[in-house]
Image (cartoon, rainbow, N blue to C red):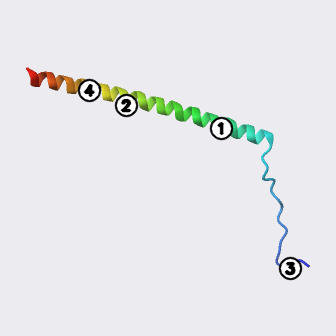
Amino acid sequence: MEPACRKDKPKLNSTPTRGDRSKQKSAQQELKQRQRAEIYALNKVMTELEHQQFETFCKQMQQQGE
């Protein structure tokens, strides 16, 4: 005996197909590549800024020594 208020729900196929898994893997690889490129770009900007600040510091130290 089933309760009258219970409705049959269609079962969703929760197992991803081979194509879905491939698309997911590809999307993850693209995300990793984009994040890596962003990290490299940020690292470059930070390195340049650090170099500029170091040059400014060196100039200030030279002026104080004169």
In front: label 1 or label 2:
2
Say which element carries label 4: helix
Would you name the residue on which mark 3 appears?
A: 4
- Residue 54 tag number: 4
Would you name the residue on which mark 1 appears?
A: 27
CA gap between label 1 and label 2 equals 28 Å
Q: Amino acid at mark 4?
A: Phe
Q: Are marks 2 and 4 in contact (CB under 8 Å)?
A: no
Q: Which residue extends farthest right?
A: 1
Q: Amino acid at mark 1?
A: Ala
CA gap between label 2 and label 3 equals 66 Å
Say which element carries label 2: helix
Nearer to the camera, 10 or 43: 43
> Could you tell me which residue is drawn at 85 percent across and 68 percent down?
8
- Residue 15 tag number: none
Say which element carries label 3: loop
CA gap between label 1 and label 3 equals 45 Å
Task: Of the two numbered discs 1 and 3 on the same chain, state the one appearing first in sequence.
Answer: 3
